[in-house]
Image: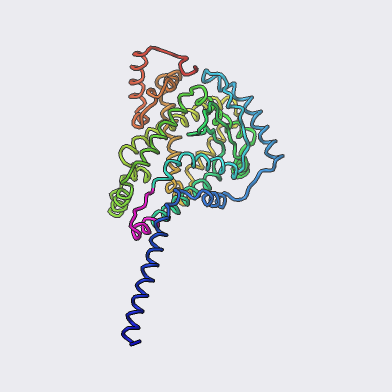
Amino acid sequence: MSERSARVIGLLIGLSLGQWVGRRARDRVATWEPPGLIDWGRARELAMRFAGEVRLSAEDREAVTGTYRRLTEELAPAIATFVGAPVPPGAQRIYAFDRIDWIDANLESFAEILRPLETLVSLPQHPLARVGALAWAYAGRSAATMEIGMALGFLSRRVLGQYDITVLGREPVTTGKLYFVEPNVRWLIRTWRLPEVDFRRWLVLHEVTHAFEFETYPWLREHVNGLLRRWVEALRLDGNLGRRLIEVIRSASRREVDHEVTWIELLMSPEQRRLFRSLQAVMAVVEGYSNFVMRQVGRHLVSKYDVIERKFEERERMRTPAEQLVLRLTGLDIKLEQYRRGETFCRTLAERYGRDSLQLLWRGPDFLPSYAELSDPDAWFQRVQRSDDQYGARPDEGHQ
């Protein structure tokens, strides 16, 4: 066989082998599917790493749960008298949590909320384009997993109590659950030298008021879930997130970012932002009203109330730059702003129009303030007063 013939045969064999390998690679790439939006197992590992291994023993958990139940039985009637509603059943569904318990409970809620987005990524058919899209999908998954894990881990060290309304649950739920994250409560009492009994009473007043809000007015939970569903659906149908991300990066590089808008909102379409701000407005009222009730009732039932309030105000002013950065990056600063705006709104209404004006909030979704009205309580009051006159006073409507 001549050298030329050998080369030709070698070339043909190489081409055939290359085609075979190419077909196998193409067939293999065609079977690849996009990853889920979040690696929930990895997110839990990250959250636990941030949280630290602080667990409650079974005996400790039982004893602390009993303490919170006794405090609730003692304090709930005073809240009932103040708000004019019976004590709700959820006020006795009380659980003492450690940080890992809290992470697990909230991971489940996050997964339920984000479930519609799990199939958001679609892959092109061309092999090279498919490989590129997969690389971006995995990069996005890593970033989102890190975000969820960091946020839950950071919060697990700070959250003291939570009223869980089981958002977007598949089964109809009319009562929520009260969680108290005992390692954080103990740490705060020890570090800030707070009066232990009074501080627990102060905390119970705030969290139990949430049970009154959501269980006395069942429409509230459905309204929150409805807004959340619509917002998630708007995210699922959005095909322009990448383009907006590039625009945000360019604007930031030119220092043209609106500092009145959170970075999360910058990535949203106008419809997504409208729904997000509607959610913010509702939760601002929920948190603000709870704080307002806690202050009004607590001053009579918590002997060291002023000491506790002063300590929390000092803590707000003394946040380290690192804490402020984490709050900003994770969007948790939005939650803190909800407390402030909502409580200012409720307090202003009570001062100008009397405490009974707050009952108008619970007539139904149309009576809740818009995002803009949170900064203009007078405009809200005038609007809902006209609606109240139009439909007639129904003081017991929300209790049905």
Q: Residue furthest front?
A: 1
Quadrant housing the N terminus: bottom left
Q: Quadrant of residue 271?
A: top left
Residue shown at 40% from the left, 67% from the top = 21
Q: Nearer the viewer, residue 208 or 18?
A: 18
Q: Measured from the top left, where is residue 54 in percent x and y?
A: 63, 47
Tell me if residue 128 is in the magenta stretch: yes
* Figure check: 358 above or below 128: above
Report x, y in % for residue 132.
36, 58
Specify the quadrant of the image occupied by residue 356: top left
Q: Give the total number of marks visible in the rendering.
A: 0
Query: Among all residues in the image, which is located at the extreme top?
Result: 392
Judge whether residue 122 is colored magenta. yes
Colour mode of the rendering: rainbow
Residue extending farthest to the bottom is: 2
Residue displayed at 61% across by 25% down:
75
216 or 321, which is in the foreground?
Answer: 216
Question: In the figure, is residue 61 to the left or right of 19?
Answer: right
Check the image and report above or below for 274 versus 324: above
Q: Position of residue 376 (x, y in %)?
A: 34, 28
Q: Please report the bounds of the magenta region as a residue range.
A: 121-134
In the image: residue 261, left or right of residue 66? left
| Residue 44 falls left or right of residue 142 | right
Q: Position of residue 312 (x, y in %)?
A: 52, 39
Q: Nearer the viewer, residue 61 or 16?
A: 16
